[in-house]
């Protein structure tokens, strides 16, 4: 295995500015965090749909999706959860650097992992927006779209976040979305947190995006 001193970043023949200018927008990462069943994936998918419909490149990095390939070797022990977040944070940073809005939707239960994801972007000069989907565990358990809460409460799923494993709420997210917020309003709130005014059309949205 190569040591860190043997690994040197390979710079291409174009700059980040060149890529962003070609796309007509700047990249960024929106990090959706919250309990299982809180609505992270639903909100991220709706934001992705809106951005793409308005001519902005976006891609959703859903927790289950990345665990189906890139992170299929990871379990749910604390160390594996940390590694899951570390990998996704690096992928999101690459997307953002390319000029895409990366929409990471993961439980990401530990504050230190989310802090690392933010620092990774900020050190690279990339915008990072943390969205806390603050749905109480009681509501998530009632929704239980995957039947996981029922199994966790029955002791069949060890280390389940919100039941037998802790969730550390963000101390200062850019946006908090409550369980009673209508989806369309939540999408607008995310866009506003990104710096995109509500109700913009395609070209106006791109121009404003470049103004970050």
Image: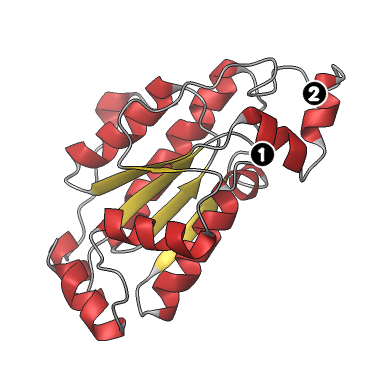
| Front residue of this view, candidates 212 and 163 | 163
When the figure is inspected, residue 4 is found, relative to residue 34, above or below; the finding is: above
Q: Position of residue 122 (x, y in %)?
A: 21, 39
When the figure is inspected, residue 104 is found, relative to residue 45, above or below; the finding is: above
Q: Which mark is residue 152?
A: 2
Could you tell which of marks 2 and 1 lies nearer the N-terminus?
A: 1
Residue at left 23%, top 70%? 25
**Residue under label 1:** 72
| Front residue of this view, candidates 65 and 115 | 115
Kindly tell me whether residue 15 is visible in this rendering. no
Which marked residue is nearer to the observer: mark 2 or mark 1? Answer: 2
Q: Position of residue 65 (x, y in %)?
A: 63, 50
Mark-to-mark CA distance, 2 and 1: 21 Å
| Front residue of this view, candidates 15 and 171 | 171
Residue at the farthest front position: 180
Residue at left 69%, top 19%? 163
When the figure is inspected, residue 16 is found, relative to residue 34, above or below; the finding is: below
Q: Secondary structure at mark 2?
A: helix
On the picture, is 7 further left or further right than 137? left
Neighbour class for label 1 at 10 Å: few (<14), some, many (≥20)?
few
Q: Secondary structure at mark 1?
A: loop
Q: Are marks 2 and 1 in contact (CB under 8 Å)?
A: no
Give the quadrant of residue 7: top left
Residue at left 21%, top 59%? 12
Neighbour class for label 2 at 10 Å: few (<14), some, many (≥20)?
some
């Amino acid at each position: 295995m190569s040591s860190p001193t043997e690994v040197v970043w390979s710079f291409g023949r174009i700059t980040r500015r060149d890529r962003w200018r070609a796309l007509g927008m700047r990249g960024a990462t929106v990090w959706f965090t919250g309990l299982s069943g809180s609505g992270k994936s639903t909100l991220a998918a709706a934001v992705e749909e809106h951005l793409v419909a308005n001519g902005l490149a976006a891609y959703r990095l859903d927790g289950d999706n990345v665990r189906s390939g890139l992170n299929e070797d990871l379990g749910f022990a604390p160390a594996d959860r940390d590694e899951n977040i570390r990998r996704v944070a690096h992928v999101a940073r690459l997307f953002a650097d390319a000029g895409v809005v990366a929409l990471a939707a993961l439980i990401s239960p530990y504050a230190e992992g989310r802090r690392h994801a933010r620092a990774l972007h900020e050190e690279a000069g990339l915008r990072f927006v943390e969205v806390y989907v603050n749905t109480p565990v009681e509501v998530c358990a009632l929704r239980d779209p995957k039947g996981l809460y029922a199994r966790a409460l029955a002791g069949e799923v060890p280390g389940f976040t919100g039941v037998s494993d802790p969730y550390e709420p963000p101390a200062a997210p850019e946006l908090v979305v409550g369980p009673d917020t209508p989806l369309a309003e939540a999408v607008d709130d995310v866009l506003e947190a990104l710096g995109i005014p509500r109700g913009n059309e395609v070209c106006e949205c791109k121009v404003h995006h470049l103004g970050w």
